[in-house]
Image (cartoon, helix red, strand yellow):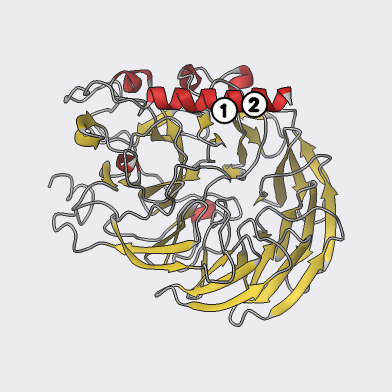
Amino acid sequence: MKKILAINLLVVFFIGVGLITSVAGEPGDAKTDPAVVPPENPYKPGETIDIHKNLSDKEWPQLGNTPQRTNYSPVKFDPPQGKVKWSTCLADLSIDNRIQPTVQAIISDGSVYVGTKNGRLFALNSKNGKILWQYQAGGPILHTAGVSKGKVFFGCMDGRVYAVDAASGNLAWTFDSQRRFGFGNAVLLAEDKIFIPDDGGRLYAIEQETGRNLWHYDAGAPVAQSAAYDAGKVYVASEDMRVHAVKADDGALAWRSEKLSGISFRYFHPVVIYGKVIVRSLAYGPFHDRKLVFECSGDYRSLFSLDGKTGKEDAVLPHWTVGHDGPMPPPAVTRDGFLVVPWSHPDFVKNCPSNAFRAWALQDSQTGKIVMPLLETKKHEIFHGKKSYLWYRGCCAGDENMIASVAGDVAFVLHFHGFRNGPTTSMTGAFHLLWREWHVRNEVKTGWERTSQSGNNQQAGGMNAASLADGLLYHLGGAGDTVVCFEPANDQNKDVRSGTPEEGAEK
């Protein structure tokens, strides 16, 4: 009882700190802050990395789009401002079809696939949102499905993995683990296999065609994070704070990392880039300690880069550590291999009103160097409550749950609730990496339509990044029951840049 009371008091304290720090401060300086935003664009686009070559711009077949979970697509979303094309509510009068916040929309062959907490897998028409079919599984579907060769695969909390026909929704096969643990993580598709850990820590390899169990590996601790794949290995993080590399062909252990700092690896997934396995944990530390932004060492660290061959840490990546719901999201990866990460800077903190001292940046995954903040070179008037401030677009409160995807040369940043209304509107939208220009939610002519689905500020249970396919963007609002599709808002701003970055450098 004393332990429960202490936890409740701690939660109240955190909320109180958040409320105190959210009181608006003094307006920022109108001039550019050189230490924060370099006047010249330091980002020089490079060659497309191998794992992003030959990607289809017509589909988003699994969590993160690639087996490496990079959340990148070659889709061109032009201009990078959106209006709602369609919105479909999955609820009906008989049952509540709420979607777990970690579920990402999957798109393939003109259909969108989404699983819900009541165990229904939905297929929707990707162009108009019409429900094509539903399949009822034997338990909640708490994470993202995957599609390959005409079948949709997903894990379920009844301890089964399902395969259904992508066109009709008819059952193809089920795999029953015959364990008391459910599958609360996303499927991973590679080498014509399905890789998925159950919540008890057993990683399975299942044949996509037949549902036959090929092998399993026991991590020795529960697993609350989806797996990633690269170069013949499956990477999974367990709740004893270790990362495991398992050979995809036979399930043999390649390596197991030393214990990493943090409380949990829940919700997200590793990201594999240049042979490095990047994982994020729920960090220790005070909720609003800004020093965590700059002094990521010891137990406060929550972002790790491990050598994919040995499991040894090979680079220290400076990072932001604590979010509204605990763990920060994994990085998205650009076409040429840079990371899009939550970020801050000492001078940026000094020049921001309220608690809006977090932004986004490009980071070199090999050195940890911040290449470019995702900020424009000047501030804009932003309304916060009844006051206006000169504020950088793309900055946000340090505790907000945000996550990024990348399509082409544009980073798309969404809130837990979607393109959100209220004081967080200046941070949800799209940033063009070449033009260094934001299209944010609260800009009438160049922004995004509001899609916040919740009437409260609940931000728990993880979050999902935007999926992009065939020129459209899809998102599932946190803790909601609605699938939203955006199309480029070509008629909202006649001054949208066009041509090459050099041609469009000045409006």
Residue at 35 percent across and 45 percent down: it is: 428
Q: Secondary structure at mark 2?
A: helix
Viewer-proximal residue, 416 or 230? Answer: 416
Q: Whole-percent x and y of residue 439?
A: 27, 48
Residue positioned 80% across, 39% down in the render: 221
Q: Residues within 10 Å of mark 2 (few under 14, many from 20)?
A: few
Q: CA distance from mark 2 to mark 1?
A: 6 Å
Residue type at the position of mark 1: Val
Above or below residue 119? Residue 240 is above
Which residue is depicted at the point 71% across and 78% down?
171
Residue placed under numbered mark 2 in the picture:
7
The answer, for residue 378, to whether it is visible in the render is no
Estimate how packed mark 1 is, as few (under 14), some (14 to 19) or many (20 or more) residues with alpha carbons within 10 Å. few
Q: In screen coordinates, is 16 left or right of 352?
A: right
Q: Quadrant of residue 219?
A: top right
Q: Quadrant of residue 259?
A: top right
Q: Amino acid at mark 2?
A: Ile
Residue 90 in picture, x, y percent from top left: 51, 68
Residue 398 lies, in percent from the top left, at 43, 30
Q: Where in the figure is residue 39, as x and y percent of width and height?
A: 22, 29
Q: Residue placed farthest to the right in the image?
A: 178
Q: Mark 1 highlights which residue?
A: 11
CB under 8 Å between discs 2 and 1 = yes
Q: Which secondary structure, mark 1? A: helix
